[in-house]
Image (tube, rainbow, N blue to C red):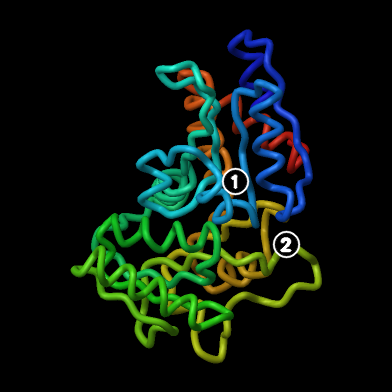
Amino acid sequence: MHNAAFAALGLNWRYLAFEVDPKNLRSAIEGARAWNLVGLNLTVPHKLLAVDMVDVLDASAKTWGAVNTIKFAPDAAGKIRAIGFNTDADAIVTSLREDLKVELRGAKVLLLGVGGAGRTAALKLAAENVAELFLVNRTASKAEEITGEIKRQFPSVKVSVGYPKANIDLLLNATSLGLKPDDGSPLDEKQFSLKQARAVYDMIYKPAETKLLIAAKAAGCKTANGIGMLVHQGAKAFEIWTGQPAPVAVMRRAVEGSVYGV
């Protein structure tokens, strides 16, 4: 999507993918700085690690506690600094509103997974003034940690660890369960029925329909996958690097063509 956007704006830029072991992340960031790259995107498991590896944290990275975008830019003395941003948080809520028409203020939300993007989602949902937030995570202590953080930062939001008993407005999957064909459901259906949810959003976008989304459709829920989140976080990163408005429609067409062959 970035290369399609560069072409649409006539920029002689190139976006490339590199696999980096977490133990080599600091070296990779320094290497990118030495090569005079404009910036980087980071995905799991690098988003939390990078918080301590950049020179400056933008307000977005400070607020959400994770870095998924880096821009290399000179300071007043001409020294190149690595500036960390987070474009995931705004992308999540933009996609929820566009793709599911969900009104987050006052909503009751069940979030599955609080690592990486899930942690960012939990904090952003609280900032959007959801009424109730239920957190479920494989490691309960992580969910409890985020619960405490939300209670401190957003005391008006009712937050708890575990499944809700009553109906909810939105179920959001931020786990990786569903990426592989033999993955089980991220949802414990003995504790929560999809018929209790009005809408279900899965951050996974490949496959286009995970087992969770298929089951949610069958239960009568409105559904959406994470393609919108992917596009909007990328569009914001594009604007950070280039200083120009992102051609979002071009980027979405490129993603859908690449991922789904349409």
Residue type, label 1: Ile
Q: Which mark is residue 3?
A: none
Q: Is residue 255 left or right of residue 240?
A: right
Question: Vertically, is 9 above or below 160?
Answer: above
User: Disc count in the image?
Assistant: 2
Q: Which mark is residue 179?
A: 2
Residue 229 place in picture, x, y as percent: 53, 46
Residue at image point 68% right, 47% down: 25
Residue 98 visible in the displayed image: no
Q: Residues within 10 Å of mark 1 (few under 14, many from 20)?
A: many
* Position in image of residue 183 (x %, y %): 75, 73
Q: What is the spatial separation of the Cα atoms under label 2 and label 1, in whole angstroms?
A: 14 Å
Which residue is nearer to you in this view: 54 or 256?
54
Callout 2: helix, strand or loop? loop
**Residues packed near mark 2 inside 10 Å, few (<14), some (14 to 19) or many (20 plus):** some
At x 67%, y 14%, the residue is: 7
Q: Is residue 74 above or below residue 193?
A: above
Looking at the figure, which quarter contains the C terminus? Answer: top right
- Which percent across, then down, holds residue 15? 70, 27
SS class, disc 1 = helix
Residue under label 1 = 227
User: Going by the picture, which residue comes out furthest to the top?
Assistant: 10
Quarter placement of the N terminus: top right
Task: Answer whether labels 2 and 1 touch (C-beta < 8 Å).
Answer: no
- Is the residue 102 above or below the residue 19 in the image? below
Which of the two labelled residues, at mark 2 and mark 1, occupies the earlier sequence position? 2
Amino acid type assigned to the residue bearing label 2 in the image: Leu
Residue pictured at 63% horizontal, 8% vertical = 10
